[in-house]
Image: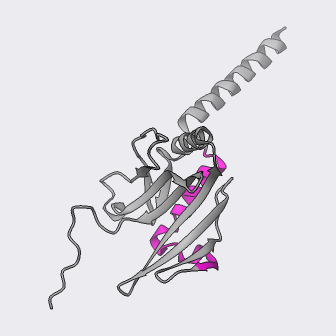
């Protein structure tokens, strides 16, 4: 009888410890781990994860990403060239479907995975945040932008964006990582002539 109580007490303590551990230290799923890893390549503009050329356009080149996200249909690194400057971005196509409700469900699930995701970029640890706005079918482009808190000066242009958009007859859910060039109210470079 004493041995049964001791075993029960031991199991109760183990269960309590693991429950506490799960509450204090959230466990990342494969999508979150992958996204955090890819975000870590942001300071080098994703150049080291750009694989083979997929498509060349006059102002951009798409490369197959060497790093992918779980369940992604396709992951792409894009190099844009403008005014002699190269800018890279990264994107994952997470779902393509003709069913808006299915796309909406995936969009909400990805939002929950990205919201408060901890990332480490150039030695700076931060948690992403973005306000959820429920997409509507009548609006052909829906977007949520996740940013680092204002206290991280070196990450003020870092963006993770989740989109749900209509392309031809389908709804496409994407995750993008890029550097926002400038704010909408910020003036561009002035050149004396």
Q: Relative to 65, is 69 above or below? A: above
Give the residue displayed 30% in from the left and 53% down from the top: 150
**Residue 12 image offset from top left, x and y in percent:** 70, 20
The front one of 190 and 67 is 190
Give the residue displayed 45% in from the left and 38% down from the top: 134
Residue pushed farthest bottom? Answer: 193
| Residue 88, visible in the rendered structure | yes
**Residue 117 image offset from top left, x and y in percent:** 50, 48
Q: Relative to 192, is 164 above or below? A: above
Q: Quadrant of the C terminus?
A: bottom left
Q: Which residues are magenta?
A: 28-55
**Residue 74 image offset from top left, x and y in percent:** 65, 63
Residue pushed farthest left? Answer: 192
Occupied quadrant, residue 109: top right
Residue pushed farthest front? Answer: 169
From the viewer's perspective, is 173 left or right of 145? Answer: right
Q: Relative to 76, is 152 above or below? A: above
Q: Quadrant of the N terminus?
A: top right
From the viewer's perspective, is 9 left or right of 102? Answer: right
The front one of 20 and 162 is 162
Q: Relative to 8, is 160 above or below? A: below
**Residue 135 image offset from top left, x and y in percent:** 47, 41
Give the residue displayed 49% in from the left and 52% down from the top: 163
């Amino acid at each position: 009888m004493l041995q049964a109580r001791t075993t029960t007490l031991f199991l109760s303590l183990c269960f309590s410890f693991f429950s506490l551990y799960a509450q204090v230290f959230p466990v990342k799923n494969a999508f979150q781990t992958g996204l955090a890893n890819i975000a870590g390549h942001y300071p080098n503009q994703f150049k080291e994860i750009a694989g083979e050329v997929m498509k060349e356009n006059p102002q951009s080149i798409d490369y197959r990403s060497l790093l992918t996200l779980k369940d992604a249909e396709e992951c792409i690194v894009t190099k844009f060239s403008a005014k002699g400057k190269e800018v890279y971005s990264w994107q994952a196509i997470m779902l393509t479907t003709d069913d808006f409700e299915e796309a909406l469900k995936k969009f909400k699930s990805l939002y929950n995975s990205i919201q408060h995701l901890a990332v480490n970029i150039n030695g700076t640890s931060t948690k992403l945040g973005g306000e959820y706005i429920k997409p509507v079918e009548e609006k052909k482009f829906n977007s949520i932008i996740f940013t680092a808190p204002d206290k991280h000066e070196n990450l003020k242009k870092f963006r993770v964006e989740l989109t749900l958009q209509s392309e031809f007859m389908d709804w496409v859910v994407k995750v993008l990582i890029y550097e926002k060039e400038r704010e909408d109210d910020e003036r561009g470079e002035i050149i004396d002539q």
